[in-house]
Amino acid sequence: MMVTPPKAPGRITAPFGAANRQRLITAFLDGRSEAAWLSVYGLLLWTDKTTGLAHCYESDKCQPGKPWHARSLRFHDWVAQSLAVAPRHVQQRRAYLPRGTARGVWQPA
């Protein structure tokens, strides 16, 4: 289930400021029934575009043949199981806070 950040109430002048962050966090947490840690992952987790895996370390170390690749695969699988989604759907449950910030900058109401 992908949670879409709300549209901004207009152009956000301080996208990384406390007021916008509070707006996004409040919107995200309102009515949540899942465990708190799952909500935190939904706020912060992102999928690394280079590897396609849930981000747990720098992408240059997580690619096949690199030291963190096996760990990244295990982490991605653990996240998918914890979210009760197929591994290919982890990216749909990611990065609410960064996406909401970007939406306020590039897609104002």
Image (cartoon, rainbow, N blue to C red):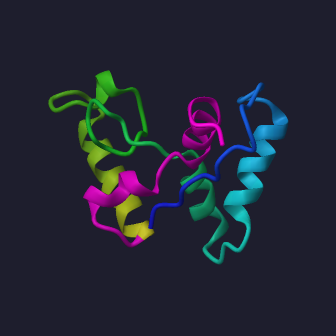
- Which residue occupies the extreme left position in the image? 65
Q: Looking at the picture, how far across and down is residue 19, in whole percent?
A: 84, 39
Q: Residue at x 61, y 61 (%)?
A: 39
Residue, far bottom? 33
Indicate the quadrant where residue 20 lies. top right
Vertical placement of 57 versus 81: above or below? above
Quadrant hosting residue 40: bottom right
Foreground residue, 47 or 61? 47
Q: Residue 68 at what x, y percent from top left?
A: 30, 34
Residue 5 image offset from top left, x and y in percent: 60, 52
Residue 20 lies in the magenta stretch: no
- Outermost residue toward the right in this view: 19
Q: Quadrant of residue 60?
A: top left
Left or right of residue 76, residue 70 in this image: left
Q: Nearer the viewer, residue 16 or 106?
A: 106
The span picked out in magenta is 84-109
